[in-house]
Each structure stands twice: as structure tokens, then as C-alpha cells.
Image (cartoon, grey):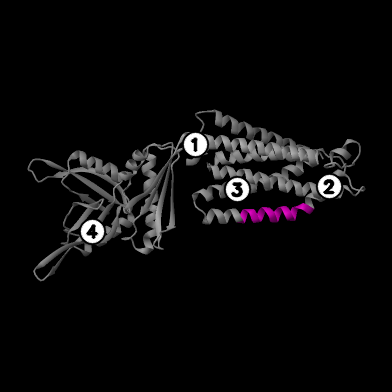
Amino acid sequence: MTRYRVFAAVALVVGFLLVYFVWATEMNPDSSYHFRLGLDLAGGTELVYKADMSQTPAGERSDSLSALQGVIERRVNLFGVAEPLVQTEQASALSGTTEDRLIVDLPGVTDIKAAVAALGQTPTLEFKLATTTTVGTTTAVGYISTGLTGRYLSSATLGFGSGATAGLSAPQVILNFNSDGAKLFEKITSENVGQTLAIFLDGQPISTPVIQEAIPGGQATITGNFTATEARDLVRNLNFGALPVPIELESSSAVGPTLGAAAISAGVIAGLIGFAIVALFMIGWYRLPGVIAALALAEYLAFMLAVIKVIPVTLTASGIAGLIISVGMAVDANVLIFERTKEELRDEKKGPREAVHIGFSRAWPAIRDGHLTMIISGVILFWLGTSIVQGFALVFVLGVLASFISAVSLSRVFLLAVVPEENEGPWHFLMGSGGRNS
């Protein structure tokens, strides 16, 4: 018994520390462990963009979409948006095809026009070869995509070179490509000497240089007819991230902070009421084991809130629902354990400690299988679900894992730390349940 009492004391100390951590970090305005709230709780703007993959080879679409996501993340971070969330998804279009979409959640931003403007300034950079086709007396000029786009760009710098007017220096934009871009750029220039390699920004040609020779090293120079201010702005935008593929705004929506605060309040109240009702039921029906279950449940909640802060997990209304449901799983496991223990106590030859040991042993297979199926369901939901479903699934899976530890470890340790060997005196009543003493 001494060993279990030591474990129980340690568990109680850890529980108090977790409660203090959750409370102190939330009260401290300078703490880096505040709860991260999703768009539906904090208020803000959600923008849904469609990525135009018509000019992207099928084998490169996944990489292009990932690069697009990274560019937009850098863009929104640059504008100081707190905890932005940028996600990609494939959705079915009305035509029966699939569309690649980019979902941008901007908590705290309620001005949709400003949000759209912040993202819309990011340029799409492309390099295309100019071709001339003559049919009879008609000559047509086209451009051929080379596959070299902004996703291969690592940096852009401002420089000055000889301008068209003697004695003046013209601003230039110097592009530096990453290793893959450098190889592709060298290949393009070596195979097309004498051809025009036009540089397009947002679909408009800004420079049409002629390839004089193969250019190794992954550096290109844009010598368009722009002023120093325009060149500086272009460098800034390109360093923010040139879009690897064009995007088009499909929809936008705003969530007011008042609605978000109401959702938080409703979630907290629902959680407290639910916890109180469950705790009262467990205590009223299972007596001492019920008190132990309520204590283990409180430690479970403190642990879950601390994990959500530390990881951190972005809390949404669906995530709060997942947390509340996982509380039910923790209670369900305790009910199984206590019912098995009660069955063993009906044998007058067995004392409370032996009954607890056997009860936990017999309840273990059902608890294990139940939690395992819930975890599998949560993983599938997270894998196949949309962002809202993923928020629910993540918190639910974490909650199921924590409830598993709470029911199997904490409740067992606390019980074995206090129950005696013999079922005599008040222990006959305390270990009973409902209207019965055993």
C-alpha cells in the first residue's frame, strides 16, 4: 500500500502543477502558452482560393500546391496576422472534376478587402520562350511555358546596370534560383541560345531578353523598364514569395469577435456543467470509487488542457466538442472498472483491495478494445476529413489517449492507495454502490 500512496501523492502534486500551469499561462498576457483559438472562436476572415493547375504537369501538381501553401503562409505571417492557418484541399467541382483549393484562415482580421489585398499582391512569376510561326504571309508570335516558375526562386535583389540613356543607371532585379531552378535555368538557356526568354509577372511580360549563351549558377537579371521605386517594390514582393501557380478568390467570409466569444462561453459552460453532472452521478452511485473517478477526471482535464497549450493545438468549436466527448470515454472506462469491482465484492471472501485488482484485470480487455476502436476512428476522420473535422478528430484522439491513461493508471493508483484489505466498518458502505452496500 505504501508504494501506491507514494504514486498517488506524486500524481496529486503533478495534477496541481498542471492546474497551476494552465491557469498561470492564461492569466499572464506575455505568456507564449495561451490557448490558440481558431477562426470560429477568435473571429476573423476565411478566404478560399482556387489554384489554376491547367499549365502544371500532373506529376508536379502536388509539389506546386505545397509550394503555394508555403508562399501564402510567409505572406500572411509578414502582415502580422496572429496564428494564421493555411490549408490545401481537393474538392469536387460541378463539372465532375476536382479542384485544388487553398483555404486561408486569418484570426482577428475582419476587414475582408484588406485581407484579399494582402494576398493578392503576391506575384506569379513565369519564364516563357517566345516562338514565331509563319503560315503563308501571316506571322504569329506565341510563348511556350518552360516550367520555370516562382516556386524555384530563392531570393531577389536590387541592382543597377547600364540604361538606355547615356550616363544613367537603370534599376535591375537580380533573381537567384534554388538548386533545382538553377539546373532548369541552365538547361533552358543552353538549349535555346538566340531565342527570347520572356519574363512574365502576373501574366504580363515585364522583360523580353534574348538568350546570348548558357547561364550556369542559377542567377537571372530582369531589366524591365521600371523606376527605382517599382524595382524595389518588385524585389520586396518576390522575396515575400512569387506564386508558383495562379490563384483565384472563390469565396470569403467573416466571423465577428462577438460570435467567437459567445462560442467560447457556451463551450466552457457546457464543459463545466457536463463535468459537474458526471462527477455528481459517479459520486452518488459509486461512492468512494466515484470520488476517485472525479479526481482522476479532473487531472485528466488539466493534462489535456496543458497538452493543448504546449503542442499547441488550435482550438475550434469542433475541437471543444471532441474534448467533451472524450470525457465521456474516460467515465465509461471507470464505470466498467467499478462494475467489475462491485461483482467481485459480492464474494464475501474477497476484500476491497483484491476486488479492485481483479476488477481492473477483468475490465482491461473491454477498455483496451473500446479505446483502440475510438483511436482508429479518430485517425480516419483526421486523415480523410476537412479542416473542421480534423480539428475535432485531433482533440478527440488526444483525449481518448489521455482518458485511457486516466482510467487505467490514475483511478487504479488512487483506489489502491486508500482501500484496506478487509471490507469492514464504513468501508462496506463506501465500496458499495447505488442503494446497495455491496
- Is tag 4's residue or tag 3's residue first in the polypeptide sequence? 4
User: Where does the magenta region start and end?
Assistant: 362-376
Tell me which residue sits at (64%, 53%) in the image: 374
Mark nearer the N terminus (1 vs 2) = 1
Report the residue marked by disc 3. 396
What predominant SS class does the magenta segment belong to? helix
Q: Position of residue 263 (x, y in %)?
A: 54, 37
**Are dots 1 and 3 in contact, CB under 8 Å?**
no
- Which mark is first along the chain, 2 or 4? 4
The residue wearing badge 1 is 259
Q: Which residue is mark 2?
A: 342
Mark 2 is surrounded, within 10 Å at the Cα level, by few (under 14), some (14 to 19) or many (20 or more) other residues, namely many
Q: Give amino acid for label 2.
A: Lys
Disc 4 marks which residue? 128
Report crowding for label 3: few under 14, some 14 to 19, many 20 or more residues within 10 A (C-alpha).
many
User: How far separated are the C-alphas under marks 1 and 3?
Assistant: 24 Å
Check disc 3 and report its element: helix, strand or loop: helix
Element type where label 2 sits in the image: helix
Mark 1–mark 2 distance (CA, rounded to whole Å): 47 Å
Point out the image quarter for the C terminus.
Answer: top right
Magenta segment: does it hold 395?
Answer: no
> What residue is at 89 percent from the left and 41 percent from the top?
423
